[in-house]
Image (tube, rainbow, N blue to C red):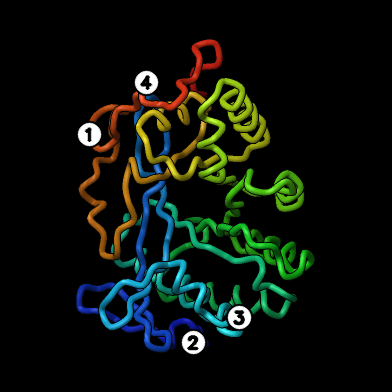
Amino acid sequence: MPRSAGLAHIVRNADGTSSGVWGIHTLKSAFQPIFAFEGGKLRIAAFEGLLRAFREGESVPPGRFFGGVPAVDRFHVETLSRTLHLLNAAACLDPDKTLFVNFDPSLFSDRAVVEVALRDTRLVMHEAGIHPSRVVCELTEQKSGSLAALHFLVSQLRSHGFRIAVDDYGADDSDISRIEELKPDIVKFDAQWISRLMQSGPGFALLKTMVTTFSERGIATVFEGIEEPWQLEVAERCGASMVQGFVLARPELAPTSFAVFSHEADIGGGHAPVADPDRAPHAVPATATATAT
């Protein structure tokens, strides 16, 4: 088979992981678990791949690194990022867990770009031995370079067996239109937005209504940015399918230590901390609560 452009910039490490090279930077994969609610328990259902850059051995903050990538190189860096996450997931993560990888819609200006991205992704997956059914392609919040190209990307990803997630729902007034157009399998709610809504009864009611509406349409939901135990309980009461955040687990560089997690943990025991609603800045009133579905 032809060789992926991303694989051409990969270094294989002695511990079985892979690193990338972009100019003076060394690029590595970090993974953060995404937990699912199941019968009062939490289990790791998936991991999100996150890129971490280093310069002369020192970590470079993600915002600074990505802000310094010239526009002409952004597509290459994203391709390299996906390549790393796929290879490292195959090397060190549970093969039964789903992997979320990011696609920046602003990079897809026409069908030719989509075809290159899909070709490279499939080549790397063949190399890594990962089946498309294990991968969720997460469309980040950036505006698309071409709406037609974005629709073509989504249709092509689906036709090859990938699932689709829309990230940062709630951060933009046009988000509901994006859901209607793309018909994702998963919606990830914007962290800052849900944090604000969680702090009041009406906000809680709105979140629960949206989660219920998505569930009725066969769309799973992820609450991101869960940083306090009380937020975990509110997420469960809202009926969120999955949760992700520092209160549960921080991202770790590959190879990770996540194998130490038990397959299931009681909410309030093991690796899933107690969710204490009394810690909320404004605890959700009892009249606004509901049992998670």
Residue picked out by circle 3: 71
Amino acid at pointer 2: Arg
Q: Nearer the viewer, mark 2 or mark 3?
A: 3
Looking at the picture, how far across and down is residue 41, in whole percent?
Answer: 34, 29
127 w.r.t. 91: above or below: below
Q: Nearer the viewer, mark 3 or mark 4?
A: 4
Give the residue displayed 50% in from the left and 15% down from the top. Answer: 285
Give SS at disc 2: loop
Give the residue displayed 44% in from the left and 40% down from the top. Answer: 243
Amino acid at pointer 1: Gly
Residue picked out by circle 1: 270
Give SS at disc 3: helix
Residue 3, numbered label: 2
Of the residues under marks 4 and 1, which one precedes in the sequence?
1
Residue 278, numbered label: 4
Looking at the picture, how far across and down is residue 176, in whole percent?
Answer: 73, 44
**Is residue 129 among the parts visible in the rendering?**
no
Residue 110, numbered label: none
Looking at the picture, how far across and down is residue 156, in whole percent?
Answer: 68, 65
Q: Nearer the viewer, mark 3 or mark 1?
A: 3
Classify 10 Å Cα crowding around label 3: few (below 14), some (14-19), many (20 and above): few
